[in-house]
Image (cartoon, rainbow, N blue to C red):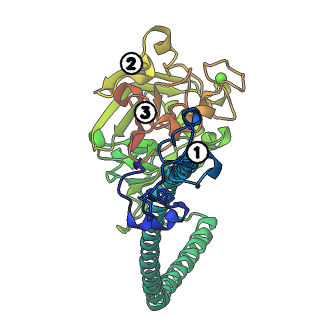
């Protein structure tokens, strides 16, 4: 706060119009221009002389009362001036206070104006900067837009041409595939006619043929019983001295084994193929048929050989020195004995991983044959909700349900999970005692031969 008597800044001079110069001091009394007059000695009585008052200082009264008052004199002037000065002083003090207040408020106004001015300048600066930034961005955006537009104009048409070419290529490939598929469909609808040169050698079964001189493994005609027509079968003439009649074979999943009762009774699949050697030396996937198998085992003591192979070319086998399959009247009941082999005795002992009742309910020996439309299993016989064959994929001598499942579903690669199955059960080509429930064999076969004592 500026002292009223302090130095004042130049720019505030305009506010000083309210300031008034103090009144000039009253004139100073000086000596009279007149010389003193020579005075005559008054002739008065002594008594009269005594009441005459002497003029007071300044001599405002004439020496002679008859002459009255001589002036306004300096004394009177001074008194009136003193009176005036008193009232003027109060006015001046008042004015001074007003001036001080005005000055203070003008100082505040000045500060505010300065502050506002600074703010304005600052805002202007911000505004300028923002404008610059916006301009920069706009420029960049325009450049990018131009770049993209050029790029699109230059490249898209050629890309489209390439894509169109790819599309045309795919279309022609699809056309070729469709043609191939329709050819295959026509081929598949026509009757499967495998043309093989059937050897002249024949017999009751493969051991008989072997003994008659047919010693190459291939397809032959056999006639176990003169009352039944001869039929084709694959004979294995090399394994364990040959003479084996192949009654079941799995090797590539080419034949569906999830079939009805009548299919299993009559048999299904492909007996053998000629792959260019002039005769049918390559077996197909097939089930010989329950009636034929049953009849063969009734000819005399028969042995049954299971051979299986995993997807790493490991092979194991199970030989049952005695095997009989009853006829349809007793639902082709199974009987096996005298196990020899390294696969585990699944048919007679059940799954080696299981214990107690859980194990015995997987034994196959003594069971009747079941298909998904004929429930003869050991799991609530007759209950349509409890059918092993429905859940495990093929026709078999199911108990409740299996330790071995050679007619199950074919799984490429071996290991499979319950997610891949139809019913969440182990429906693969399983031999639990060797590979457990969740491994499906690459190859599986069943061969029979008359038991002959050495
Ligand atoms: Ca059942």
Q: Quadrant of the C terminus?
A: top left
Q: Which mark is residue 353?
A: 2
Spatial separation of the CA atoms under disc 1 and disc 3: 27 Å
Quadrant of picture, ligand 1: top right
Residue ID at (45%, 79%): 135
Q: Residues within 10 Å of mark 3 (few under 14, many from 20)?
A: some
Q: Is residue 247 visible?
A: yes
Which element is circle 3 on? loop
Relative to 369, say whether 218 is above or below: below
Spatial separation of the CA atoms under disc 1 and disc 2: 33 Å
Relative to 304, is 328 on the left or the right?
A: right
- In depth, the one of 9 and 88 nearer the eye is 88
Relative to 113, say whether 47 is above or below: above
N-terminal-most mark, 1 or 3 = 1
Contact between labelled residues 2 and 1, with CB atoms less than 8 Å apart: no
N-terminal-most mark, 1 or 2 = 1
N-terminal-most mark, 2 or 3 = 2
Mark 1: is the Cβ under 8 angstroms from ligand 1? no
Residue ID at (33%, 28%): 343
Q: Position of residue 373 (x, y in %)?
A: 69, 35
Residue depth check, mark 1 versus mark 2: number of the one nearer the observer? 2
- In depth, the one of 61 and 294 nearer the eye is 61
Q: Position of residue 185 (x, y in %)?
A: 61, 68
Residue ID at (30%, 34%): 316
Q: Which mark is residue 267?
A: 1
Q: Is residue 408 visible?
A: no
Residue ID at (39%, 56%): 282
Q: Quadrant of residue 43?
A: top right
**What residue is pinned by disc 3?**
438
């Amino acid at each position: 706060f500026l002292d009223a008597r302090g130095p004042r800044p130049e720019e505030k001079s305009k506010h000083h119009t309210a300031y008034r110069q103090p009144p000039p001091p009253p004139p100073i009394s000086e000596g009279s221009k007149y010389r003193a007059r020579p005075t005559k000695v008054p002739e008065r009585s002594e008594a009269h002389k005594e009441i005459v008052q002497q003029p007071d200082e300044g001599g405002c009264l004439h020496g002679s009362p008859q002459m009255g008052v001589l002036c306004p004199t300096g004394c009177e002037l001074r008194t009136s001036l003193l009176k005036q000065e008193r009232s003027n002083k109060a006015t001046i003090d008042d004015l001074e206070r007003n001036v001080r207040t005005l000055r203070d408020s003008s100082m505040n106004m000045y500060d505010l104006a300065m502050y506002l001015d600074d703010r304005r300048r600052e805002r202007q600066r911000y505004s300028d900067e923002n404008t610059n930034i916006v301009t920069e961005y706009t420029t960049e955006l325009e450049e990018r837009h131009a770049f993209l537009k050029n790029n699109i104009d230059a490249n898209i048409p050629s890309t489209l041409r390439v894509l169109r070419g790819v599309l045309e290529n795919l279309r022609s490939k699809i056309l070729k595939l469709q043609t191939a598929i329709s050819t295959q469909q026509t081929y598949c609808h026509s009757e499967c006619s495998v043309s093989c040169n059937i050897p002249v050698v024949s017999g009751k079964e493969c051991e008989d043929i072997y003994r008659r001189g047919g010693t190459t493994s291939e397809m032959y005609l056999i006639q176990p019983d003169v009352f039944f027509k001869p039929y084709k079968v694959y004979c294995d003439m090399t394994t364990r001295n040959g003479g084996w009649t192949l009654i079941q074979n799995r090797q590539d999943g080419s034949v569906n084994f999830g079939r009805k009762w009548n299919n299993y009774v009559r048999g299904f699949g492909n007996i053998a193929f000629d792959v260019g050697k002039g005769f049918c030396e390559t077996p197909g996937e097939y089930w010989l048929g329950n009636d034929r198998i049953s009849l063969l085992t009734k000819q005399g003591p028969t042995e049954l050989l299971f051979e299986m192979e995993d997807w790493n070319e490991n092979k194991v086998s199970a030989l049952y020195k005695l095997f009989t399959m009853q006829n349809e009247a007793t639902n082709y009941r199974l009987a096996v004995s005298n196990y020899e082999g390294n696969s585990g005795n699944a048919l007679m002992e059940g799954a080696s991983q299981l214990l107690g009742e859980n194990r015995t309910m997987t034994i196959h020996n003594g069971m009747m044959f079941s298909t998904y439309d004929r429930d003869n299993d050991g799991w609530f016989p007759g209950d349509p909700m409890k059918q092993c064959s429905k859940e495990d994929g093929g026709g078999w001598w199911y108990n409740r349900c299996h330790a071995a499942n050679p007619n199950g579903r074919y799984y490429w690669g071996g290991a499979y999970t319950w997610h891949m199955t139809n019913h969440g059960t182990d429906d693969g080509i399983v031999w639990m005692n060797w590979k457990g429930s969740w491994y499906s064999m690459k190859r599986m076969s069943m061969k029979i031969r008359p038991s002959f004592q050495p």
